[in-house]
Structure formats: structure tokens, C-alpha cells
Image (cartoon, rainbow, N blue to C red):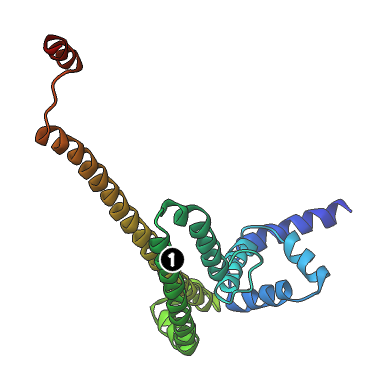
Amino acid sequence: MAEEKTNERHEQAAHSNEAPTLSGYREYAAAMSGNDQTAKQRLADQHKPLPVEYEKLYRAEQMLRDHSRGDTYLSRMKSFVADARDNLLPRINDARDRRAAVWHIKSEYEQWGHERKELHARQRAAFERNVELAMQLADAQEGPGTPAFFARREVIGRYVQQHENLNRRLEQEITGYIDRVVERQTERNRQSISQSESAILDEIVRRPREPAQARDRDSGRER
């Protein structure tokens, strides 16, 4: 029994020194996306860090496909729009400006959806070619199957950045639009207050009045 445990530790140690391969990743992805709980548990019991490399890539790919539980680029954008509705729009006091902001957000969100769809199509169409080009730049001494894994990871990482940039542009556009509306609103309020104060002072300048005590004193003399 002790010998079996020793051999198991040696196997785990040897496994931990292995480089990730594309075939190993595909096996991992197939197990994680299926319903075989035994296979998933076997992967969970494997010695780190090899499964960690596979898990990172698997999660990134699930994010790109909108298959990740709870957290995708689509869910992030929906969450941002909800936050804009609850926390950014209330900063706009004027009803007309607020309605205009709502339509602006709607228009920008629809445009984002169109661009996102096109980005997905371009990424899928060029995926194999991009991986092939990335493999040409990979170190051939990594070992059989390893350059293919790192090439795939490099391409997926580039795709992830493209989606993050697309989300960031929409967030900045919406936030910037509302900030500009609030700035104009603040300036209008400032001008309105300034005009009101100026009108009061103009009234004083045009119709100067004596102090009340002086008026009373003059009235007494007349009597």
C-alpha cells in the first residue's frame, strides 16, 4: 500500500512537470462541457498546475461563446446598462434631456450588438488561420503538441481583448454622453441663477430706495 502511494506521488510529480498540449486541452474541455461527473472529478484531482492552464483557456473560450455561467461579455454589458439606468440617468434633471439620453443609450447598445455580431463572425472565420500563423511563431522546442496549445491560447487571448475593447468603447460613449448632458445642465442652472441674481440687482439700481428710517423721518416732518 505504501509503495502504491509512493508511485502515485511520483506520477503526480511527473504530471506536474508536463507541458500543456492541445490534445490534453481538448480532453479537458470535452470533460468539462459534458455531463460526466466522474471525468470532471478526475480532472479536479489532477496535480496542479497543468489543469490550471487548461482551465484558464477553457473559461476564456466559454466567455467568448457566451456559455460561461453568469459572466460573459453580453452579461457584463447588460449589467452596465442597468447601472446606467439606475445610477447615471437620475443625474439628469430635465425630462427632455433624460429621454434623449435613453434613446442614445438604446441606439448605442444596438450598434454595439451589430458590431459584436460582426466581430464574432470575423473571429470564427479567421480562427484556424490565426492559430496556424501563431504556430509559425511558436517555439518548436516546446515539445509535440505544445506549440499548438500556446498558439490557440494566444489567439483566444487576442479575441478576448477585442471583445473587452468593444465593451469599453460603449461604456465610455454612454458615460461620456451623460457626463456632457450633466455639464450642460449644470451650466444652464448656473446661468439661470446668475440671471436671477442680476435681475434683482438691476431692479435695485434702476429704482433706488431710501432706507425705511429716513422715509419715516421725512414723513413726520411733513406732518
Per the image, label 1 sits on a secondary structure element best described as: helix
The residue sitting at 21% across, 42% down in the picture is 194
Q: Please, which residue is most extreme toward the right here?
A: 1
Query: In the rendered view, does 36 fall on the left or right side of 113?
Result: right
The residue sitting at 62% across, 65% down in the picture is 55
Disc 1 residue crowd, few under 14, some 14–19, many 20+, Cα 10 Å: few
The residue sitting at 29% across, 47% down in the picture is 189
Quick check: can you spot residue 20? yes
Quick check: can you spot residue 19? no
Work out whether residue 165 or residue 77 is closer to the camera in this orientation and state it: 77
Residue 217, quarter of picture: top left
- The C terminus lies in which quarter of the figure? top left
Work out whether residue 115 or residue 81 is closer to the camera in this orientation and state it: 81
State whether residue 79 is above or below residue 145: above
- The N terminus lies in which quarter of the figure? bottom right
Work out whether residue 167 or residue 49 is closer to the camera in this orientation and state it: 167
Q: What amino acid is at disc 1?
A: Arg
Q: Please, which residue is most extreme toward the front here?
A: 223
Residue 109 in percent (x, y) is at: 46, 73
Residue 76 in percent (x, y) is at: 54, 64
How many marks do you count on the picture?
A: 1
State whether residue 87 is above or below residue 44: above
Residue 35 in percent (x, y) is at: 80, 74
Residue 174, quarter of picture: bottom left
Query: In the rendered view, does 220 fall on the left or right side of 65?
Result: left
State whether residue 3 is above or below residue 216: below
Query: In the rendered view, does 63 fall on the left or right side of 98?
Result: right
Mark 1 sits on what residue? Answer: 99
Residue 129 in percent (x, y) is at: 44, 88
